[in-house]
Image (spheres, rainbow, N blue to C red):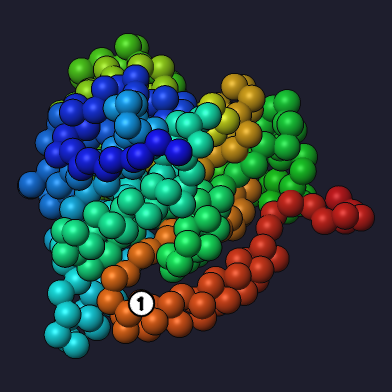
Amino acid sequence: MNSLTLSLHRAIAEIPAADWDDCAGFSNPFVSHAFLSAVEDSGSAGKRTGWLPQHAALRDDSGRLVACAPMYAKSHSYGEYVFDHGWAHAFERAGGRYYPKLQVASPFSPVPGPRLLTRPGSGIGTAELGAALEQACGELGLSSVHATFCTEAEWNELGEAGWLRRMGMQFHWDNHGYASFDDFLGALSSRKRKSLRRERRDANNCGLEFVALRGGDISKAHWAAFFRFYTSTVDRKWGSAYLTEAFFPLLGKYLGDRVVLMLAMQAGKPVAGALNLVGTDALYGRNWGCSGDFPFLHFELCYYRAIDFAIEHKLSRVEAGAQGEHKIQRGYLPTPTYSAHWIAHAGLRQAVGSFLEEERRDKLREMEALATLSPFKRAGEAE
């Protein structure tokens, strides 16, 4: 086998887009060179937010990129959606130094997908890149490497290599070959079907016009309005506005038709918006905001319009972001998410490993309990 060399890069621009995307593939836009470029070029990921790029590039002895990973040096745990603050506090109380750490992730995006990206046909797999990241972490004297929202296959391979495995949960909608929204409703119990129809009716009786814009059809004015929605949502939830105003138009410019902005218009002006990205088989809902008070508008714009879009474009699922048990009643069911963690300190690794074993059991029990709340008809259930 060829010898391999790992290098770390302080900007995604240092790695040619074609080489990166040959490893990343095109199924998930959140690990594309274009998305990561928009995050960095807009000033969203960088010193201001504490996401310092350290993108990993693994090359063979001919200089060809055979694997890579979107990676960041972090001095905090914000904007990750997989919470390890408790690990950090415990380690620091014991005299350790948890930060900085390395985070393999798509910044500010709780979207499952590949994280350790390998070129097809190169003979390089997740384990080889994972070992290189462990070595880099050790040479830099850092505490840990965290691959968050990775695929189940990566989770298993890294687990076999000694990484700790964590399980989370989101709520996803699966397209079972529905021909229309009414076809989807037909799969629900009578009571739930009536409830969803009522919500859609009320949302669509507010005098609003709904549009779904893609790529170049999204104007600067649309993006300016959406940024106002985004910041108002952040303010209400006591969060941090990691994404700058420049990010959204850059996203539309760099990703083109893979960006879908769903807007609710009143008298020709946007009053609410939901930002989505399109993969090869999924619609990914990201940010939302609203400047008024309209019944069920959040459900309509973020969940039901997303289902309409997925059915029309024959996408297999909708992933509507983190949290939200209320999504179950709208057809979005519990789905496991995965992250893998390599921790240098043996004591901390053992303590976290024990915690994660119990947490996984609890998460599986929780998902099993939540699945009983499914709105779908059960076999033999009468209308």
Between 352 and 7, the residue placed more toward the observer is 7
Outermost residue toward the bottom in this view: 94
Quadrant assignment, res 363: bottom right
Q: Position of residue 48 (x, y in %)?
A: 7, 47
Quadrant assignment, res 187: top right
Instruction: Give the secondary structure at mark 1.
Output: helix
- Residue depicted at 77% across the width and 50% down the height: 190
Q: Is residue 99 left or right of residue 2?
A: left
Q: Which residue is mark 1?
A: 349
Q: Disc 1 residue type? A: Arg
Quadrant assignment, res 290: top left
Confirm whether residue 185 shows in the render.
yes
Above/below status of 196 relative to 314? below
Say which quadrant the N terminus sits in. Answer: top left
Confirm whether residue 239 shows in the render.
no
- Residue depicted at 63% across the width and 48% down the height: 331
Q: Is residue 21 left or right of residue 140?
A: right
Between 242 and 24, the residue placed more toward the observer is 24
Q: Position of residue 172 (x, y in %)?
A: 56, 47
Q: Position of residue 189 (x, y in %)?
A: 76, 51
Q: Position of residue 309 (x, y in %)?
A: 55, 27
